[in-house]
Image (cartoon, helix red, strand yellow):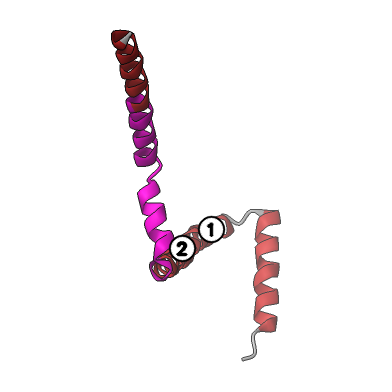
Amino acid sequence: MVQGGSKKYKWRQNQFLKQTFHLNRLLVKYNIEGIIDLLLRPGRLVYLNFLAGIARGFGIAVGLTLVSAIFLAALAKIASLNLPIISQFIARIVQLVNEQLPY
């Protein structure tokens, strides 16, 4: 009877170890330690979010500048081709912009 109980105990202990290792892998995979660390230190969370916001804003500004420059260069190239409809449209836009300038 002692031997049968011992096998059952070892089986349960083995299952417990498997579940513990599985839980450990999940905690490492999802970086639960880092999340808990941020939740316990709200000042660091605010600081990291502030830096992330600055980085996003800078990235948007640089990206918008590059895309606008490419768009304007393409628009200038199209305007230099003297296509009838497109050139008239661009000339009208330039005329409207010049009318709105205060000088």
State the SS at label 2: helix
Mark 2 surroundings: few (<14), some (14-19) or many (≥20) residues within 10 A: few
Q: In this view of the protein, which residue sits in the foreground, 80 or 4?
A: 4
Above/below status of 26 relative to 85: above
Magenta region includes residue 24: yes
Q: Mark 1 sits on what residue?
A: 71
Tell me residue 10's x, y (percent): 30, 18
State the SS at label 1: helix
Q: Amino acid at mark 1?
A: Phe
The label number, if any, that marks residue 56 in the structure image: 2
Q: On the picture, is 36 further left or further right than 17? A: right
Tell me residue 75's x, y (percent): 56, 59
Tell me residue 32's x, y (percent): 40, 47
Tell me the residue at 58%/59% (across/down).
Answer: 79
Looking at the rendering, the stretch of residues picked out in magenta corresponds to 17-44
Q: Quadrant of the C terminus?
A: bottom right
